[in-house]
Amino acid sequence: MATLSSSSSSLWKNGLSLRATQSTSIVRSTALLGYRRTFRRSFVVASSSFDNDNREFVIVGGGNAAGYAARTFVEHGMADGRLCIVSKEAYAPYERPALTKAYLFPLDKKPARLPGFHTCVGSGGERQTPEWYQEKGIETIYNEPVTSIDIEKHTLTTNSGKLLKYGSLIVATGCTASRFPEKIGGNLPGVHYIRDVADADALISSLEKAKKVVIVGGGYIGMEVAAAAVAWKLDTTIVFPENHLLQRLFTPSLAQRYEELYKENGVKFLKGAMIKNLEAGADGSVAAIKLEDGSTIEADTVIIGIGAKPAVGPFESVGLNTTVGGIQVDGQFRTNIPGIFAVGDVAAFPLKLYDRIARVEHVDHARRSAQHCVKALLSAQTHNYDYLPYFYSRVFEYEGSSRKVWWQFFGDNVGEAIEVGNFDPKIATFWIESGKLKGVLLESGSPEEFQLLPELARSQPIVDKDKLENASSVEEALDIARSSLQVKASV
């Protein structure tokens, strides 16, 4: 993410030097690619030689973007008998952020479970269960990873050999977790990566019998999984090579506040550490992590949270962005191939507000990009996507927790950072560049205060830095920022 963050994660020494990138991240290049394309939709004649009945529109993917795209098709009356979703997962699209939060709570803390978090409940919408898709006439094909595409024939082939026909195609494949190589123990029993329900279920099985948990990576995944491990009352250590938590967004002083909170909950930190390999015990399962300095950390459960890679899979031929990764699209999410679109984590799109190409790994972007794409595909909408980067985290939200954490960030973390507040419970950080407010992070804000943040970040008003620095409270600092909006509006 001091540029918001990078989605490319280098592995640790030995060829494996980790940069703890976050699963929620934004990657950008320095120049905006300006281009326009023509679009045509290919209509398909029915044929019994294909394995899908609904062929006019096909979505590949089973996460947030797929679910919100499906809802938008329904809202436009274009889903029934026309839309097919093909997914490698066994479930209807769901709100993926739950997997590193409430899904990991122990049973006595009321964990989240499906069907409770199918899309689109995360934004206050209807819960789209498998029955919902049936009722709306949407064809769903589960447990079928797409392995190849024939662009000329408009067909997809799945892992089991199914041949699917499409008129218009939306690639919503998201990301895959970055992994440690097998040669250093990356696939040992007891080593976990979290990207889908099956991953989370496997981790829960380990947590039920775990004694010593080590989390590799100090980003979003690391912080959220560590908070969940606290609920299990487990010996928990976070290991990462940076100097502080969430280095791509947090300032050192802000990170220190969160680190102290985690320590109060029993979490230990090993910062600036380089991992050499994971070691197996007598039973073949992971037993320890060996560091480059020769020391070891005992562990019977290890969670690797070192970032993610765009799940381009068989769609490389559609056209990739070699700088930020992912499939290159324009402001309508059209790829270089007419009739093929890409949305969510896998899409490299023009970030209009900051005049650069970006790839954003976040649920908010997944939802908004899917909706924008489908509206552009089905209607006369011609305006380009204008996204405001947004990140948040909510942890320690289980029953019995002494302190719940909920922060939100909007904008760009560039320039000088000004911190206001004492973290009891509120704290705010304002980023100012050339006198303009570029980004703002707020912990434990009220609904009204959180609503102010995107307005500030998008407007980028001129702010009196001296007044902010001398603010006696977060409330006073936000009032100063709010008044700068009124001044800008009157000019």
Image (cartoon, rainbow, N blue to C red):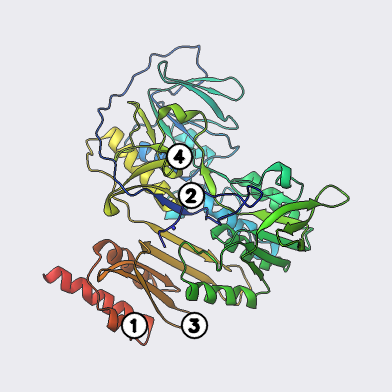
Question: How packed is label 3: few (under 14 Cα within 10 Å), some, or many (20 or more)?
Answer: few
- Would you name the residue on which mark 3 appears? 424
Horizontally, residue 41 falls left or right of residue 298, namely left
Q: Amino acid at mark 4?
A: Ala
CA separation in Å, label 3 and label 1: 18 Å
Looking at the image, is mark 2 or mark 1 earlier in the sequence?
A: 2
Looking at the image, is mark 1 or mark 4 earlier in the sequence?
A: 4
Looking at the image, is mark 4 or mark 2 earlier in the sequence?
A: 2
Q: Quadrant of residue 445?
A: bottom left
Contact between labelled residues 1 and 2, with CB atoms less than 8 Å apart: no
Residue positioned 42% across, 22% down in the render: 166
Mark 4 or 2, which is nearer the eye? 2
Looking at the image, is mark 2 or mark 3 earlier in the sequence?
A: 2
In depth, the one of 211 and 18 nearer the eye is: 18
- Would you name the residue on which mark 1 appears? 469
Mark 1 or 4, which is nearer the eye? 1
CA separation in Å, label 2 and label 3: 32 Å
Looking at the image, is mark 3 or mark 4 earlier in the sequence?
A: 4
> Helix or strand or loop: what does disc 1 sit on?
helix
- Would you name the residue on which mark 4 appears? 66
Question: How packed is label 4: few (under 14 Cα within 10 Å), some, or many (20 or more)?
Answer: many
The image shows residue 30, relative to residue 237, as above or below, that is above
Looking at the image, is mark 3 or mark 1 earlier in the sequence?
A: 3
CA separation in Å, label 1 and label 4: 44 Å
CA separation in Å, label 3 and label 4: 39 Å
- Would you name the residue on which mark 2 appears? 7
